[in-house]
Each structure stands twice: as structure tokens, then as C-alpha cells.
Image: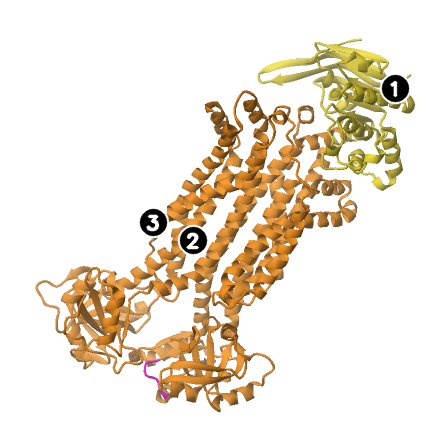
Amino acid sequence: MGIIVRFIVKSIFEKKFRAFIIVFSIAISAALFFACSGLSGTISSMYENQIKMQTGEADIIIQSDEDSPSGTFKIKSEPIDGVSYITGSISASGSYKLSEEQSETYSIKTENLIVRGFNMEELEKLNPVNFSQVAKNKDFEGNFIILSIIFADKYGYSVGDRIDIKINGRDKILTVYGISRPTGIFQHNPQSDTMTAVMPMDTIASLRNVRGRVQTAFVVLEEGVDIKSAMETLEDLYPRYRVSEPFSAEELNQYMQFIVVPMFMMTSMVLFISIFIIYSTFKVITTERLPVIGTFRSIGATRKMTDVVLIGESLTYGIIGGIVGNILGIGVLYLIAKIMAADPYNGQMNVSIKFGIGHLAAAFLLAIVVALISSWRPISKASKIPIKDLVLNNTEIKSKNKKWKKYAGIIMLLLSAALPLIAPKSLALLINVVGLLISTVAVVMCVPYITRNFLNLFDRFYGNFFGNEGILAVKNLNGNKNILNNISLLAIGISTLLMINTISSSVGIEVLNAYKDWNFDIMVSLYNSDRNTEQVLRSIDGVDGTYGAYESWDGVDVKGEKYTIRYLQGVDIKRYRDYVTFRLQGKMDADETFKLLDEGRNIMVANMAKEKLGLKVGDRLTLEMKSGDKEYKVIGFYDSIMSNGSNAVISQKYYKMDMKQQEISNFFVKTSKNPDEVLSSIQGKFTRRGMFGDTIDSMEKKNYESNNQFMIILQAFSVIAMLIGIFGVFNNYMISFMERKRSIAMMRSIGMSKRQTLKMIMIEALTGGCIGGVVGIIGGTLMLWSVPNLMQSIDIPIAIHYSLSFFISSLVGGIFIAVLASISPALKTSKLNIIEAIKYE
Amino acid sequence: MENIIEVKDLNKTFLLGELTVDVLKGINMSVKKGEFITIMGPSGSGKSTLLYLLGGLDKPTTGKILIKGQDISALSDEEQSIMRRREVGFVFQFYNLVPNLTVEDNVMLPLLLDGKKINKYRDKLDEILDVVELSDRKKHTPRELSGGQQQRVAIARALINEPDIILADEPTGNLDSKTTEEVMNLFQKINREKGKTILQVSHSLETAKYGNRIINVKDGRVWQ
């Protein structure tokens, strides 16, 4: 047994490239699986940490919302079972006016601050301030302020200095109590324009005339207390306020599904390619080992012993691949976390990865299972060869003409095309994922037949095109399993890459189209806006027109359905379409339909929501609105991907009534001047009013970046799939060269020159690459067919925009890879020793 | 009769690691057109090496090989390949057929390599397959044929381009005695009826009887 093991170990080291490919395939599969399985927890933990920076050790938060009687409330003094303590905070907007010198340096006139009022003793318990400097022996009360180190360094303040800050419109002279490092509530968000400062709770409350009240209450529970039951108790005590957990893992997990599901899909593609490569490589390994196995068997080794050794070899690859995969996986997870940490909306999160022994064990197990499953069939086939045939070297494993494969492949192709159309909504996600995988398997199963048909076609004109070497190349390709494997590998890799690139570019186009629908340049949001605010806005130089939009991004539940309309607009039917291009579905007249909106509780619904709710014109929807349940009649549908297509439009009149909202949510601003300059003027005008504004170009850019961030990860996965495929193609060409050495030497012996040999091999590569590219395009198109349904099943509407350039580059890429991979075998072929290759069987 | 092959002071040295092995030492010989020669000798005597050198599969260390008066060792790879296609037909012990090509494709290979339109050679193919008695097997692949049949395909392939010389390296070494007889009768027929010059390497005196001259190679030298 020891000798056999030594033989196997030696054989592994002799074929280093082959061993590398197997280990690489296993390791990458395990790494991606590890990263996918650990991603949800990692991102959750990153978000949690981000939120905890602001909320400290609070388990529950109490805040006012739209239903609350006031923006502030009193913390009830009576003790509550299970609650350790409750502390509150109150915020105000602050503004620091820069000196002339500072203004010149930083090109701004004021620095905005969020000033949060805390009781220092309570804040130290809840979320301790990380002071770099602090006043000694002084109580934190009166006109003290704690600045962040970033602010203090920027404007040159230290403890004890006086600073002028306008708080809620009132000038205050404050004394610097401390300087905090940028952690906890002082954590700085590079993307944000606003820094945080802390003042004594009572001072802020006095400034806002709300002494004894808080804006937010932070509840810390005693150890072991059930959060849900504590929340119920608090909801009873604060019935008109929002009681929530600072961080909802459930919501985040739901969001993570959008990211993790496509990643798992890509991982399964990588897994599929890996299994394919390991399987074909193991076929070569077992074939090569047969004579030696025969020798061992003839001198007394049992079939079980030789099987165990081959399985042992596979297991060795699995173990090495599993270990390497886990190490790689940690790196991949960190990279993904780093990419996702740069959230264009919420700022940079601290990157930290979270995984457990379970994740490591699962990835390791997967590596071993992949190795064993992929190698099982070749090992079992070799095991069945009688000892006599092994000894006599009569070991050619004849493959039967498996016609069923062709029919099974065709049926699977049809099935994968039909599944997205017939999948019931409740099972849409599962069925579409299965459909996607089936289409990949189907394409691989059909590769021999597609190739044969292509070769029959090429056979007709290759002679004229490439001469007799072309005819020979076609003949060689017919039935060459290594070339078929290459075509399959290229096809899977190309189709995956094509699919992801097309989706990525489609998302880009959709985002662009969505923003193209907005025929204005700036969006401005101001606290307590009304028509007077709009008048002021219009008076600003550069503002050519404004539209006051009434809209809710909080979501309105549809009664009786598990569905929330995420974005509801109440539109002014006369002016809305001057600012937003509205694309009605079907042949409905836009003027007539908009007129209908004002004639009662009528609603127009975006297509995605229509699909989800199965609506038709005339249906009635009951919306759970602020003023109670309201029934709306569906009068039309339109194209929109805002809020992932979960949006609807009603009349402004009914919106104000039913949503109990008199303030304008946002202003759409048109300008013929530079939007950035106009936005700056608007900001200057409303400095004291806590405004948010952005240009449409900037919003589009952020949206694109946000999508792109995710697409980059998926593209990286597809590139890895392609990379493994390329390694597989290189390996197959080398195997093919070794297997064909004798045939090529024979051709050389009957008169084939080196030039002819090279030409023939290059034509073979060109043809294989070309077929691989075409099959990849077919496979990619088939996959893309199911993508809109798949994405719809996770509430992401996407229209696929096919790109000719992607198709062409897929084809060219396939040819390039095949030709590149064949260069080394071609050069080796030209140096082939004809006699050696011919003479020895 | 004119000499179709002439060998002058032929030497061939191989390097085995650091060891230099003189396989052929100063060989001089000539072959007349239409001869059927058997090259005999013990294992390692250099007889196969001599055959491969005559066929241009390897280059001599020193010396000359003239095929129809042309020194083949001075030819480029392209010219040597053309010579192998047109002037020489090879038959090997292990047949050396392309396993995934049909019988007719295997036979037509030298024509394809010579840039010829194979459709013009269908009649010729049928004629040669008749000679080797494989007309009914032309759509089969080598895997579906017996050893003797495979060797006959190899002979047909060697004949398709109508070379004047057939070089055979132990053509019956892998066959049973009955099939050996069939194959040797075929060689004899080709030699007598088509006037082809045949040089075969063999260990067997039985097969040598089908030819008309024996060349003995021993220790790298020719003993005629």
C-alpha cells in the first residue's frame, strides 16, 4: 500500500499543472461559497456596527413619527420591568460661520453641524465619548460643546476655546468642553457635509423650548430580557410613538437576499465549471494510471485497494483545495465587504468580516464533496476494467452512443426557456434559479450535437477557405472529446460573462433611462415647505421653474395583500408632466387618464407593482393611509423602475387628504444654468433651514455607483468562472496534445510538414473557439431569457438590453482564448520526435 | 535496373543522457527499383533507424541518402514532407491510423496533405480498397476493425499517392500467422503487379521469403 501511495504522490508532483488546475478549481469554488455564505452575516454586522456607533448599547429606540402628536416626548419616570435605563437626546441644527481666511482656504462660508443634546453621565453609559482632550473638574452643563477632532483640527479649536455657533437660528457663544476622536456618535462620514457636536441636553432643550422632553429615547434592557416583549410593553406606554430596534437584522437579511442570491447563482456556475474540469482531468488521470494499477493488481493488490488510492488522491485534492479555499474565501469576503462598505448613500462603513467555524467547515466540506463527486465516475469506470484487460493494456473505455443525452439536452433547453414563463409567483425565485442551472447543463449536453452540426457546415467551405488542412482540422475535431470539453468550458464561461455584462449594462441603461424621465435638474427637500417656500425658491437666480412634489418614500401597505407600494406620489395633473416623462402602458390617452386622476380616488400603478398584484384597469386597491384605509380605483399602468418598480401615482388633492400631508416633500427645480452653481445658491439661501439638495446628475451618479458596486462583485465572480474555464481549456489542449501525439506523428510520417501541422492546429483552435463562442452566446442568451423573471421574483424589475458589441466580443474572446491556449501545444507539436511518438505504444 | 535508393557512408549517433551511441556506422547500400527487400537483424541493431532515415523521418548524423538521385538529408522540412507524401509510403507495426477517422479518411490522408481535391480520387480509393479487400469497410473507423484489417488500411494509405517506395516497419509484428500470410501476400502482389519497391524491417525469415533480397544489419553495419 505504501508503494502505491508513494507512486500516487509522485505522480501528483510530476503533473504539477494538472494538480494546480484541480486544486485551483476546488479552492475557488470553496472560496466563493465561503464568501457567499459569510456575506450576509458580515454585511449585517457592518451595518449593525455602523448603527451602534450612533445608538451605543441601546436595545430599543423610541422616536416620534408622522402619527405622533409632537416631535418630542417625555420619558416616563416609572420603572419598567426588564429595562435597565432609558436616556434621551434632542437635536438641533447648528451652523459655524467661517472666518474670511478659513472661507478662502475651504471655499465655503459656513460649516453645518448636527448638535445633539445629551446628559453626559447617561451618554457615558450608553455610548462613551472617546475624548482626545477634555476639560478637567468641570460639569458638562450650560454653554459647553464637545467638538469632533476633525472639526477642531480643521478650524483650530482646543479645550477651553470660545466658539460662535448659530443653533436653530440663534447665535450662541460656547466653550469647548472636549474634543472627541471620530468614533461613536462622532464617527465621521466622508460623504456627508455635516459633522456632529454634542451639547448638554438641558441647553439644547431650552433653545428649542422643550425642556424635560426628548426627541429620541434610547432604551437599554437588563441582561436576558426578551426584546420583543419589552417592545410590546414600551409600545403600550408610548402608543403614538415609534418603538423599534435600532437595527433590524430581519430587514437587512431581506435586503441581502438581493445580493446573496445572484452571488450564490454565480458560485453555482463556478462550481459547475469546476466539477466539469475535475471530472475531465480525472478521466485522464485514471487512464494514465491504468497500466500501473494493472501491475499492482497483478501482484496482489485488490480492486478496493487501488480504488481507495485513487479516491485518496481525489480526497487529497479536496483537502488541499478546502484549506486553500477557506484562506482565499476570507480574502474574497473581505474584498466584497470592502466594496460594499463604500455605500454612496450612507457613507463609508468600517470593514470587518464575520464568519464562524460553521462557514469554514461548510466550505471545507464542499471542497471535499466537489473533489469526490467529480472524480467518482472516472474512478468507478476504471475500477470495472477486468484485471486481464489491465495487464494486456486493453483498456480503452468505449463510450456508448448516448443518444438520450441529445434528447435530454433538447428537452432541458426547452424546459429552461419555458420555466420562467410558467413559474407560479410563489415559487418564481426557486424555479428561475433552477431554470438558469438547467439551461447551463442543457447547453453542455447539447455541445456535441451543436458542434457536429457546425462541423458539417464548416466541412463544406473550409477546404476553399483554409485548404486541405482545414478539411483535416474539421475531421480531427469531429468526436475529439477534449475539444468538446473545451467548447463546453468556453461556452459556460462566455455565457456567464455575457449574462453578467449584459445585466450590468442593462442596469446602467435602465438607471440612465429612469433619470432621463426627470426633466428637471435639481431636487430640493426643505423642512416644513409650503407655497411660500416655493416662492422663495423661485426667486433665486438661475431657478427657471419649480414643482412642489407630494410624495411618500416610506411605503403604503396594500390592504389584504402582502405588498407595500414603496413610493407614492400625489401629482398636480396640470404640471407634473412638465417635470417628469410619464410613459403610460398601452394605448391609453395620457391627458384623459391624468384628468381621471383628479376625478376621484383613482390610481395609476407602475408595471412591476401591477405584475406583483395581478391588477387590471378597473380593479380596486385599498391602501392603508394616514387617515385610514382608502379605496382607489386602478385607471392605468406605466413604466417606471423607481423604488424597483414599486410605485404608484394618485391625485395631489387626495394625497394631501389621505396622507394628511400639507407640506411639500420635494421640489423639482429646473434651471438653464449650471445646476451645481444653482444648487449652491439654493443652499446659501436656505442655510438655516436644514435642507437637502442634489443635482439629478449627482443622484444618477450615486445610483449608478450603488448598482455598479454590486455589479462589480458579480462581474468578478463571472470573470473567475471564465478564468477557471480558461485554465480548463489550457489543460484540455495539453491533454489533447498528449493524446494526439501519435496521430500527429503519424501524419508527419506520411508527409505533413511542420507548417501544415501548425496551420491545422490553429484552424482547430479557431474552429473550437468559434463554436465555443457561438454556443456561449446561445447559452448566455438563454440565461438572459430567464433573468427578468428571476429578478422580478426578488422584486427587482429589469429589462434586458442586448448589446451587439458583447456578442461580438464573446465570439472574439472565445476564439482568442482557444488560439492562445493552443499555441504551446502547437509549438510542442512542431518539435515532436516523430519516431519516438510513433514507435512506442 | 536503376537505383531508386542509394546510401553513402551513413552514420547515425544518438545521445542517451551523457552516453553517445553509434546506431549506424558507415552504411553503404543501394536499392533497385522494384526490389522487395527485407532488413533483418537482432533487436537494437539499427534496422528500424535505417528505415526511418530512408523515409526522411530522421536526419543522418553524417552521410547521404539519395532517393531517386536526390539527397534527402539536404532537404528542408517542407521538401522532406513533400518527399514523404509523393515518393514514400509508410506502414508501421502498430498501424498508426487516426482512430476517429473512417477507413476512407485514413486512406485519403496523404492526398489531403498534398493539397489534392479528394473527390477526384474516389475511383482510385475504391480501386485500392479493392486491392486490400476492404471495400465494404470504408465507412468504419479503425476501432471497428481487426488488426489485419487495420494493417491493410495502412497499406492502402501507403499506396494512395502512388509512391514508388513502400517502407514497412515490422508490418506483421502485431499480427497472427494467418493474417501475416494475408498481409505478406498483399505486399508481394503490390510489388509484383504495381512494381513498387518495398523495404520491410522484420525479425521473421518467414516474411522475408516474400521478398527477393535480405539485408542484414548487425551492430550498426550492413551485412549483405
Q: Which residue is found at the position 12% from the left and 73% from the top? A: A142
Q: How far, Cα to Cα, is label 3 from label 1? A: 83 Å
Residue A649 screen position, x and y as percent:
47, 81
Q: Please report the bounds of the magenta region as a residue range.
A: A526-530
Q: Which label sits in the foreground, 3 or 1?
A: 3
What residue is disc 2 on? Answer: A36
Amino acid carrying label 3: it is Gly
The amino acid type of the residue labelled 2 equals Cys
For the residue pair A106 and A522, the one nearer the viewer reads as A522
The residue carrying pointer 3 sits among few (fewer than 14), some (14 to 19) or many (20 or more) residues within 10 Å by Cα, namely: few
Q: Position of residue A387 (x, y in %)?
A: 60, 26
Above or below residue A684? Residue A279 is above
Query: Label 2 is found on which chain of the structure?
Result: A
Q: In this orientation, which residue lies closer to the viewer: A220 or B199?
A: A220
Measuring from the top left, give residue A638's x and y in whole percent. 53, 78
Chain identity for the colour orange used in the image: A
> Magenta stretch: residue A628 in it?
no
The image quadrant of residue A568 is bottom left
Dot 1 crowding, Cα within 10 Å, few <14, some 14–19, many 20+: some
- Which residue corresponds to mark 1? B33
**Name of the residue lying farthest toward the left:** A137
Q: Quadrant of residue B103?
A: top right
* Label 3: element kind: loop
Q: Residue at x 55, y 41 (%)?
A: A279
